[in-house]
């Protein structure tokens, strides 16, 4: 009983931690605005790029809870850079949105994991899909 209680508490704290790392739509919009505001020269309207100094200014302007999880040097270095050491704003922002979507899905899955074993059984997955369907836009 104690082991089960500790496990539930650990999973709840993990879920709370993951929730704290999710970017809200307004935060994503603000990040996009900041990335574009700190774009580095030479400018190209079709391929805006940002250097590391501008990236750090964006990181400083974003909520502190997101800093080391999305705005560290290792995140900047994940992307190919051009001869001026800049990375594509669009590529970085797409990565950020993808990470947020994956995190959101992992949190949703953890809510449906009634057996708390880290996997969804057939019934749990069916429940997730049936709850998801009304949220999807009609074709």
Image: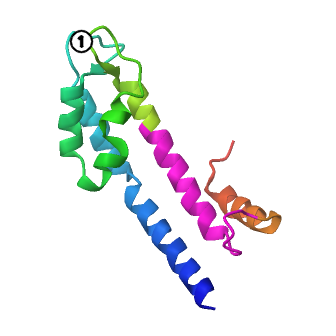
Is 53 or 111 nearer to us in this picture?
Answer: 53
Q: What stretch is highlighted in magenta?
A: 96-120
| Residue assigned mark 1 | 43
Residue 37 in sight from this viewpoint: no
Residue 109 lies in the magenta-colored region: yes
Instruction: Please identify the quadrant where the N terminus is shown.
Output: bottom right
Residue 52 in which image quadrant: top left
Residue 62 in the image: state x and y as whole percent.
24, 47
**Residue pictured at 28% horizontal, 16% vertical:** 85
Q: In this view, does 9 lie to the left or right of 85?
A: right
Query: Does residue 131 sit above or below 30 in this rendering?
Result: below
**Residue pictured at 45% horizontal, 40% vertical:** 97
Residue 113 in the image: state x and y as whole percent.
67, 69
Q: In this view, does 112 lie to the left or right of 30?
A: right
Query: Does residue 30 sit above or below 90 in this rendering?
Result: below
Q: In this view, does 100 lie to the left or right of 70?
A: right
Secondary structure predominantly adopted by residues drawn in magenta: helix
Label 1's element? loop
Q: Which residue lies furthest to the front in this view?
A: 3
Residue 136 in the image: state x and y as whole percent.
63, 51
């Amino acid at each position: 009983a104690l082991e089960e209680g500790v496990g539930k508490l650990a999973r709840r704290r993990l879920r709370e931690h993951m929730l704290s790392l999710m970017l809200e739509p307004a935060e994503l919009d603000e990040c996009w605005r900041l990335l574009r505001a700190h774009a580095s020269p030479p400018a190209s309207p079709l391929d805006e790029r940002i250097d590391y100094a501008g990236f750090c200014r964006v990181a400083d302007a974003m909520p502190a809870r997101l800093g080391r999880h999305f705005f560290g040097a290792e995140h900047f270095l994940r992307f190919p850079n051009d001869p001026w050491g800049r990375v594509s704003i669009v590529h970085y922002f797409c990565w950020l949105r993808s990470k947020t979507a994956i995190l959101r899905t992992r949190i949703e899955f953890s809510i449906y994991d009634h057996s708390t074993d880290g996997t969804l059984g057939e019934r749990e997955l069916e429940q997730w899909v049936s709850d998801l369907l009304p949220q999807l836009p009609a074709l």
